[in-house]
Image (cartoon, rainbow, N blue to C red):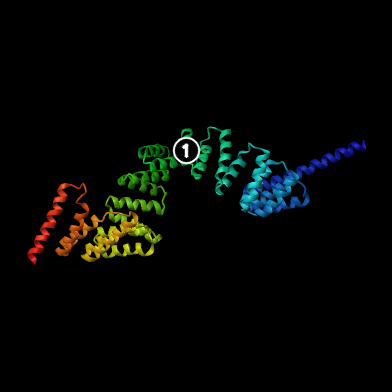
Amino acid sequence: MKKSIILISSILLINSFLFAQNSNSFEIDSLIAEGNYSLALYKAKALVEKDSLNPNLLILLGKTNRLNQRYTDAIVAYDKANVLSPENKSLLLILAKTYSLSGNVIKATKTYETLIELDSTNTAAQINLSNIYLKQKRYKKAFIIFQQLHLSDTLNSEYVRQMGHCKYKNSETLKAFELYKKSYELNNKNLKTIVWLANIYSNSQKYDTATAILDLAIIDFPDNGSLYASRGNVSFKRSHHYRSVTDYKKAIELEYHSAWIQKKLAQSLFAIKEYEESKEIFELLIVRDTADFQVCNFLGNIYNEFKNYDKALIFFDYAVELLTPGPLVMASVYRGMSNSYAGKGEYYKQIDFIKKRYKQQLIKHPGFPPHVQFLEIAKIYEENLNDKKLALKYYQKYWEVIKDWDFRLEHKEQVLAKINHLKEDLHFQN
């Protein structure tokens, strides 16, 4: 009878202890749900002090530390719980996540790898580990994981897209393209797939296909600014600037705006001769990024259109002084500067910058024929400087370059007539 009483008392004592423990755990969970993390942590510490070998209480302590962003303390608690319960997969998962939060990527990686060894189908561990590999640019390892995920869920377009992303990052563009197309076939509403495919088709000059993909996507996602920006880029590449202006403006309206999009919009407005609106955007951009030589160059050309040549020259000089752009851009800058000096009536400076432009063209394309600059300079000497001798010299240089070319016969006859006429004028002057 005594033994029965002792046994019953022991059971009641254990049950009352477990009930108290569960009540305390429930109270802490309630505090967490309310967002009162500090008090929850205080109570969790008190529980662990009473029962430091209870893995569930250690996990609770780790959780409350983690929520309070005390990641080092959380890891200590989770590690102790892991020693007491080494095959607890949910514990390994949260431990790996906490290592990531603390910045200990090496430990996070090893913990995820350990978990996957215990459970090769643990999707959370696979996804989280693949994200680490992507950040580390270990694309081959990430690809293997996404491939395994794809085998477990063959209809998931995101796994296929990520496989394509890994191949693309490893410069396997054709394989990436096939995988992205497969991703699109599985789900034609995957936005990341849509934008990537549209860019690839656009870069391959398959503009109609790119536009068709984006048109369908915009029907499904009419409030997605990135889709309008992507369609604007396709139109921009086709020089369909009225369309690109509309799409860029819509993208900005939908708060998909950046200096890059605004710059493209300003360039499109310039192309359709909306110079005032283009100027306003470029001037906003130059305040934020004064080192963008393209913005300076466009502003110079806009002020040329407004016949404000002094201001145009300020921006052209700015483009040259602040940066060292390539010869193609320098040639464009010098073209703008020669136009500015022409507008100011400073024709000798105009000629000087025409020659500078040609030197940049030679750097970009060795052997670039000089006939265009000869004709430009000849006309300036004849029409603006009334220097028939130098005009004749440059017309003759121009003729020597084109005489054996398959130029329009009418044009050649005009050049010869010009040369003969100038010779006659000079003869009678003498």
Residue 423 in picture, x, y percent from top left: 11, 60
Work out whether 24 lies above or below 375: above
Q: Is residue 407 left or right of residue 117?
A: left
Q: Is residue 274 left or right of residue 428?
A: right
* Placement of the C terminus among the 4 image quadrants: bottom left
Q: At label 1, which amino acid type do we have?
A: Tyr
According to the image, label 1 marks what residue? Answer: 180
From this viewpoint, which residue is outermost toward the right? 1
- Residue at point 33%, 52% (across, down): 267
- Answer yes or no: is residue 298 visible: no
Residue 128 in picture, x, y percent from top left: 59, 44
* Placement of the N terminus among the 4 image quadrants: top right
The quadrant in which residue 226 appears is: top left
Residue 387 in picture, x, y percent from top left: 15, 65
- Answer yes or no: is residue 83 visible: yes
Look at the numbered disc 1 and give the secondary structure of its residue.
Answer: helix
- Say few, some or many: other residues with alpha carbon within 10 Å of mark 1 (under 14 / 14 to 19 / 20 or more): many
